[in-house]
Image: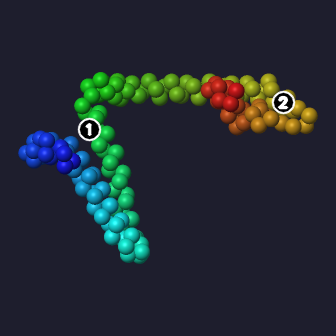
Amino acid sequence: MGSKLLAIGVGKYCADKMNYIDGSVVLLSVVEMVADLILAGDGGSNLAQFKALRMLRTFRVFRIARLLRALESMQTIIQVMVKSYKSFIYITILMFLFIYIFSLLGVELFGNKFNYDGEVPRTNYDSFDTAFITVFQVMTMENW
């Protein structure tokens, strides 16, 4: 923040709205570091007062918004994703319908047939809930 202020000057720095977010995040971080130094000498007895200050670290994430604003290709990708979210919902519903159908089919065809030496494997088709998870594992090729 200091080097940017020296490079472009206070006027240009304050002209960009994103610099307000950057500056506030940097200043809050400095305040937090100073508070930690003061409390470290105090033995941490007043630490509860500054717990809320530590939650402000999450505002550092807003600095990423500056990058997204600058990249036109990223803006195009985000716009396409926003426009096509309804299609993703329909595809997800269709996928769960197929998992549901194949789980029912698996329970009917393979229920209670995977007993090896009295031991039932973790993924089986003995009940609908384990069949649902088994079909999902087969579909995603997880643990195969």
Residue at the extreme left: 11
At a point 75% along the width and 34% down the height, the residue shown is 123
At a point 42% along the width and 74% down the height, the residue shown is 43
Tag 1 secondary structure = helix
Pointer 2 local density, CA inside 10 Å: few below 14, some 14–19, many at least 20 = some
Q: Are marks 2 and 1 in contact (CB under 8 Å)?
A: no
| Residue 138 place in picture, x, y as percent | 67, 26
The amino acid type found where label 2 is placed reads: Phe
Measure the alpha-carbon separation of dots 2 and 1: 55 Å
The amino acid type found where label 1 is placed reads: Arg
| Residue 18 place in picture, x, y as percent | 21, 42
Question: Residue 12 is drawn in which quadrant?
Answer: top left
Mark 2 or 1 closer to N-term? Answer: 1
Residue at the extreme right: 117
Q: Is residue 108 above or below residue 59?
A: above
Tag 2 secondary structure = loop
Observer-nearest of 13 and 42:
42
Residue 66 image label:
1
Split into 4 quadrants, where in the image is the C terminus?
Answer: top right
Q: How many marks?
A: 2
Residue tagged by mark 2?
114
Pointer 1 local density, CA inside 10 Å: few below 14, some 14–19, many at least 20 = some
Residue 96 image label:
none
| Residue 135 place in picture, x, y as percent | 68, 28
